[in-house]
Amino acid sequence: MTELQAGQSTQPLDVTRIDARPQRYRDVLIALVAFVLLALLPFIFGSKQLLDFVIRCAAYGLFATSLNLLVGYTGLISFGHGMFFGLGAYGFGLMMQKTGVPIPVAFVATLAMTLVVAVVIGAICVRLKEIYFAFVTLAFQMLIHSTILSWQSLTGGDQGLRGGIPRPPFLGIDLSNHLHLYITSCALLVIGLLLMRQIAQSPFGYTLRMIRDNATRASFIGIDVWRAKLTIFVLAALFAATGGIIMALFVSGAYPEFAYWTISGEGIFINMLGGVTTFLGPMVGTVLLLILNDTVTRLTEYHGIVLGIVILFFAIGLRKGLMDFVVEWFAQRRGEAGERAP
C-alpha cells in the first residue's frame, strides 16, 4: 500500500446523515391533533353509542396494529396473538379485584406480567419457520384459553370475571365516569399508535423489513435475527395487552372469548381489510370491521356469510387491503400525471 493510499484509507467516509427529527416532530404533531379531535367528539355529538364505538376502536385498533408489527413489518404471521389481548384483560381485572392497587400500578404490573410471558413464548416460537411459528402461537393461545376455562376459582371459568372491576380515582381521573374512560382510552390509543409508528420508522423497524424480505441475507450481514424477532414479538404483545386492558375497563370484566383463537382471527381479518403495507391500514380495518359487525348483526342473523363475502371481495377482488389499494391508486395517478407533464 502506498503512502497516498494509506492516507486515503484513514480518512473518514463522507456519509450524509438523514435527520429523522422532522419526521418525528410531524408524527407527534399529528398525534396531538388527532387526540384533540377525538377529545372534542363528546362535546360535538354527545352520543354515548359513538363514545362506545371509539373505545372499542381503541382496544381493537391497538391489538390489530400491534399484530401488523409482526405480519406486515416482520413477516411473522401469528395465529395466537390474541392470547396477549386476553392476558391484558384478565391480568388487569384480576389485579384490580384481588389486590385493590391503584389503576396505574395495575396497568404497569399487567404489562410486566405480559412481558415475562411474551419472552418465554417468543423465545420458543421465533426460532421456528413461518408455518410452524403460526401454529405454535395458536397452540399457546389455546393453552392459555384452556387454563382460563379450567381455573374457575381464579378466572371464573366460562362465566368470566364477575363482580366488575374496581376503578378507584387517581390523579383526578375517575374511570367509572364514562367521559373519563373515553378520554383515557383515546389517550392510550394515540400514545400507542405514536410509539408503534416510531418503532416502524426507526432503524430497528427497517431491520425488521430486511428480515421480512430475506432473513438469511440479514443474518449474513451481522443482524441477530432471533433477537430482533423476539424483541418485536414482545413489543407487539405489550401493545396488544394494552388493548385488552382498555376492553376490560370498557366491559368491567374479562371473558374467555378475549383469549380464544377467534380474536386472533379477527386481528388477521382486520389487517386484510385495512392493509398491511401502510401503518394506518389496521386502524382503518378496525373501523370497517366494527361497522360491519354492528350493521350486519342488526340486519340479519347470517352475519358470518356477509363477512365471508367481504373477505372474498378483498382477497380475490382487490387482492389487497383498502389502504393498500388507495395508496397504490394515488401513486399510479401521480405517475400518470408526471408522464403527461411537459
Image (cartoon, rainbow, N blue to C red):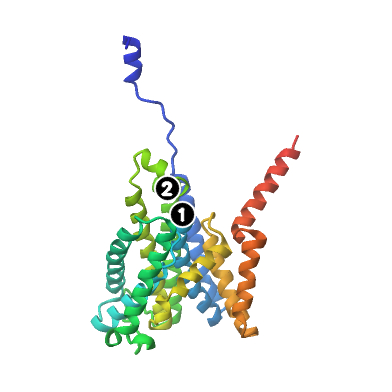
Residue 273 horizontal/vertical position (percent): 58, 65
Residue 154 horizontal/vertical position (percent): 28, 84
Local secondary structure at mark 1 = loop
- Placement of the C terminus among the 4 image quadrants: top right
Q: Residue at left 36%, top 77%?
A: 145
Q: Residue at left 58%, top 79%?
A: 294
Q: How far is disc 1 from disc 2 in space, using C-alphas?
A: 8 Å
What is the number of the mark on residue 211?
A: 2
Label 1–label 2 contact, CB within 8 A: yes
- Placement of the N terminus among the 4 image quadrants: top left
Q: Amino acid at mark 2?
A: Ile
Q: Give left or right: position of 207 versus 272.
A: left
Residue 278 position (above or below residue 336) = below
Residue 9 position (above or below residue 319) = above
**Disc 1 marks which residue?**
75
Foreground pick, 324 / 184:
324
Q: Amino acid at mark 1?
A: Gly
Q: Residue at left 35%, top 43%?
A: 223
Residue 287 horizontal/vertical position (percent): 56, 70
Local secondary structure at mark 2 = helix
* Other residues around mark 1 within 10 Å, as few (<14) / some (14–19) / many (≥20): many
* Other residues around mark 2 within 10 Å, as few (<14) / some (14–19) / many (≥20): many
